[in-house]
Amino acid sequence: MKLNIYFVGALILLLLSACEKDNLKEPTSVLSGNVTFQGQPIGVRSDRVQFEIWQRGFAFFTKIPLNIAQDGSFKATLHDGDYKLVRLPNAGPWLNNTDTINVSLKGTASVDIPVEPYFVIKNPSFTRNGTNVSATFTVEQNGTHSRTLEAIKFFLGRYYILDLGNNAASRDAAGLVLGQPITITLAIPPAIANDDFIFARVGVKTRDIGEYLYTVSERIQLK
């Protein structure tokens, strides 16, 4: 009889625990912000750069992945609480900084994540001339690191999401010249030549770093 009482008691506790889990409210608070350099958002490859949010539980830390959009923005729906935002090593085209950022969330919170890119793209401009589009810009080294520039690419595509893996055409710069104006001209590919508009974007890659740093995708009117 005692065995049955213990068994019934354990079963009741298990059911109560399950009910508590089922009754947990869905998270409604929003943490948002941007990955920035000198106060401006950094362009990256869409959903390929990821940071982490950690919240202390009763017995352990819980990790929440935080994906960065191509314009450098992010948004996460969470419960109110205190969080640690972690910049992962080698996560993007910038110098490693694994310092945590403490965030207190109650309803909404906005936070910027500052980074130091290896190279930056200055004064990008895009012009259309008939069936061609040209990009003009300069690339400069940021800081005194020993990394070298590996590639400079110009991309055209049908959609705002535009990067190394999502484009209709791309072209490399003829030379990797720092601090001097660079112009790359790319023919509009037939697959998108009859669209009302397309998008253009420039990216630079640091040697031995997986991700490009990008400009904002700019709309080019065709009709």
Image (spheres, grey):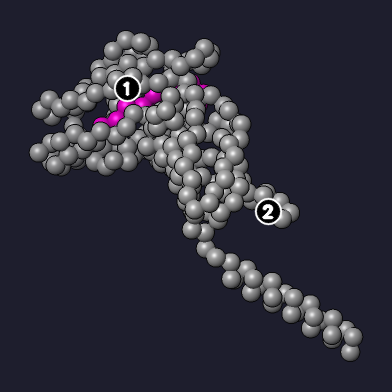
Closer to the eye: label 1 or 2: 2
Q: Quadrant of the N terminus?
A: bottom right
Locate residue 15, reporting x and y percent. Answer: 69, 77
Q: Please tell me whether residue 127 belongs to the stretch shown in magenta.
A: no
In the image, 91 versus 26, the foreground residue is 26
Residue at the spot 15% in from the left edge and 36% down from the top edge: 221
Residue tagged 2: 57
Locate residue 114, reporting x and y percent. Answer: 49, 30
Q: Is residue 210 visible?
A: no
Task: Measure the C-alpha gap from mark 1 to mark 2.
Answer: 48 Å
Residue at the spot 74% in from the left edge and 75% down from the top edge: 13
The correct choice, above or below, for 109 with respect to 80 in the image is above
Going by the numbered disc 2, the residue's amino acid type is Gly
The secondary structure type at the circle numbered 1 is strand
Residue tagged 1: 172
Residue at the spot 49% in from the left edge and 14% down from the top edge: 143
Region rendered in magenta: 200-209
The secondary structure type at the circle numbered 2 is loop
Of callouts 1 and 2, which one flags the residue occurring earlier in the amino acid sequence? 2
